[in-house]
Each structure stands twice: as structure tokens, then as C-alpha cells.
Image: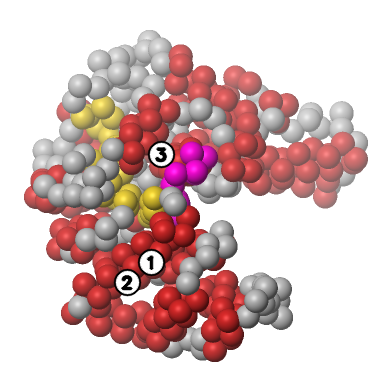
Amino acid sequence: MPDREALQQRLEDFRTAGQNLQLVPLVTQEAFNDFGVEYQTKLIDELEQSVEDCTKQDNKLIFTGHRGCGKSTLLAELGFRLTETNRYFVVMFSISDTIEQSAVDHVNILFSMAVQLLEEAEKRQVKLKPGLKKDLYRWLAKHTKTEVNAVESAIEATGEVSSKVGLPVILEFLLKVKSILKVNSVIRDEISTEFARKISDLIARLNEIQTYIENATGQTVLVMIDDLDKLDLSITETIFSKNIQPLLEPAFRILYTIPIATLREVSLKRNIEAVVKKIHKMPVAKFFSKATVRQVDRVPDTAMMAIFSKILERRLPKHLIDPTLKPQIILKSGGVLRELIRIADSCCDRAMQDIRRQLRQAQFDQPTVVISQTILEVVLTDLQIGYSESLGQNDFDLLKGIYQDFKPKDTENQRFLDLLHGLYLLEYSNALHWYDLNPIVKDLLEQEGVLDGATTG
């Protein structure tokens, strides 16, 4: 039986595991070295080839997939690979870094791109001509109403000029610009209004930045904009249905992420397909085929189970979990990495609560705490409750129909798109697309009596 010291160590072990199970993508080389697992390598190869084979007339890439399926980590890995060739000046950023999600439009996507290109050029100490550099920063300062005198002095000065907090003055200026774009809706609206009328001016400025970076580095600019797929569907539909053309105008390679639900609207999908060579899709990991998924004695795909098991083991030490539970956690994820991490993290939280209670009550005669069947069931019940809060009877009927038929009656039905976007429904692929319920949502429908648990498999 554990003593106080052993309980404290157990608590620390779970705390560390919880920190390793945060719902954030692996976008740094250090994070990837710590937790990365080889996954979807063929898709990375496909994206790399598309980047390499771009032409001036066809150099925009569209990347889609369910939220939480690992797109950001995969894009970061693509960026590492391309950067290592020393032929690409790769800039990857999340749109949420610079713009409040509800305020994103095509203008501030492009404006954010200019800010991020300049910031990355500064971080890598790209030598731009002083006159040009001053002009670019004056332009940013003008549109964001930011003081630029210190930046101009830094550009003129030899050596590095630092601010009081130790940051180079220019990087501090760029951080201030990003902060203004994020929180100052008045300035953001002014930028959108001005450049909506003369978008060609903004695009010309972007092309100017690209030209000087490429001339200074000898590398080809590639910008990857992440997290557009996490925006509300109404926002992405407006951007990619009514304002996609300006996003295609910059002269350099750009990769945009979009929600998978957006592509279920036929007219919008056709609109995108008309202007890009191919839409690249990251599929949800599939443990079962459509033919076997309803069979009671179905056997999950061994290779995919092994990959997900390895992902879990990189973050959650074996001694903290009953080994018989790992397959349950993996299958309850539905093949969505975010769900896998979320379930495991919640289990760690619940285990830490049990340990703290033992410490508080000096219960040293209890078995060593591990993630047990009891803990997992409590976590899954909590997740079911979370999903249930947004569902009504009409949703139950819609979900039941999709469960029975593997597809909706209408793929453009807005509620279907919302449920797909919110991970209530998951899209899989064999030769054709088919849909299934998130396993936790399936359990919820069984609890509600909408599905018969004895016959659903």
C-alpha cells in the first residue's frame, strides 16, 4: 500500500502525464521529438509533391479534414521537412494568433500574412534593404496606428537594438501589431473596409515582401495558414464562396486549411475545385470497414490500433493505466486524435482527484491509483453529457438515420453540417465516403433509447 510520499509521487506522475496530454498540436521540433509518431506519411509525401510541383498559375493548396484529426501536426512536420531542404522559406501560423475567430475575413487573412512574413524574416535575420524595410514598417504602423519611430531608429542603427524587456525593438513592434489586430475591432474593421475596396494594393504589398525575402534568402516562400478549419462554418463559407479569388492572388505558394463540412456543400466545393488543382484531405483513422463496423465480433485494424497505442504511450506511462483499457480508449476516440488525447487527459484528471482525496483523508491503506474501468466510465459519461447538451429530438432522429444508412438524406442540410463540424458525426472513406456516429455519441443514443444497444454492435 502507498505511503504519503508514494502518493505524492503518483500525483506528480499523473500531473506530468496530464501536461503531456494537452490538446495542442505538435508544431515545434522539440514537441515532435518528444511525442511525435509516424502517421499519415503518404499524405505528407502528397503535400510535399504538390508544393514542389507548383506553377505560378497553380500554387494554392487546400487542406481539409475533421477538427482534431492531426492536421496541424502534419503541416508542422511538412514544414520541418521542407525547411531542411534549405530551399523553402516556410511560414506556418494559426489565424487565431492574430485575429479573433469571429472577425476573420479574406482581408485580414491577407493582412495577417504580411505581418507573419515580416516577423519570420526578422526572426531569421533576413537582410532587407533599409529603405524598403522602413517603408514596410511604416505601412504596418499606418494601418494599425502604431508608433514606428523606435523601429526606424533600430533599422538605421548598426547592431541589435533592444527594448526594456529584452526583445529586439522590431519584434516587439510586430507583437504589438498582432495584439492590436487581435483585440482592436475598430482598427481591424478599418483595415477590412479600406482594403476590401482596393484589395490589389494589399496583394501588391504581399508580393513585394515575398520578392525581397526570396531575393535575400534564395529560398521559395511558402505560407501555411492553420486553424481556418476551426472557424464557424458561416465564416468559412463566406470567405471561400464569395471571396476566394483575392486569396488566390498573391504570387507565392499558400496552403489554406478549411473545415471538411464546408466541402459537403456542392456549390461551394465546385467553386473551390474550379480554382485549385486538388483538395487534399486528411482522413479520420479507420479501425473498421463499413462492411464490418456493425458486426458484434468485429476486429479492429491491427496497424491503426498500434499507431494509436504508440501515440498514447508517448504521453501516458504504462504504469498509470490498466493495460486492458487502452483498446477501449482508442476505439472510443473514433479515430480522432483529439478525442484520444481528451479522453486520456480527463482520466488523468479523475485519477488525480482520487489521489488528492486519499492524501487529504490520509488513506494509506488503499490500492495504488491507476486509470481503471471505473475512472474511464465516469469520464465517458461526462463526455456524453457534454455532447447531449446541444442535442434535441430532431437531432436524435437525424443521427439515428445516419447511423442506419451510413449517410444523411441531404448532405447540405445545415444541421448535418453543424454536427459533422462538431465531431458528433465522423466521415470515413473506403471507395466511397460514409458516415458514422462518434462512438461517445453512439453510446449517448443508446442511453437515450434512440438506438438499441443490444443490436448496434
**Magenta stretch: residue 456 in it?**
no
Residue indicated by mark 2: 205
Circles 1 and 2: CB distance less than 8 Å?
yes
Q: Please give left or right for residue 258 compared with residue 163 in the image.
A: left
Query: Quick one: quadrant of the C terminus?
Result: top left
Q: Secondary structure at mark 1?
A: helix
Circles 3 and 1: CB distance less than 8 Å?
no
Is residue 420 something that shows in the picture? no
Query: Quick one: quadrant of the N terminus?
Result: top right
How far apart in space, not on screen, are marks 1 and 2 (Cα)? Answer: 6 Å
Q: Position of residue 264 (x, y in %)?
A: 17, 44
Q: Position of residue 44 (x, y in %)?
A: 40, 33
Q: Residue placed at 87% from the left, 36% from the top?
A: 6
Q: Amino acid at mark 3?
A: Cys
In the image, the segment drawn in magenta is 83-94
* In the rendered image, the vertical position of residue 75 relative to residue 93, given as above or below: above
Q: Viewer-nearest of labels 3 and 1?
A: 1
Residue indicated by mark 3: 69
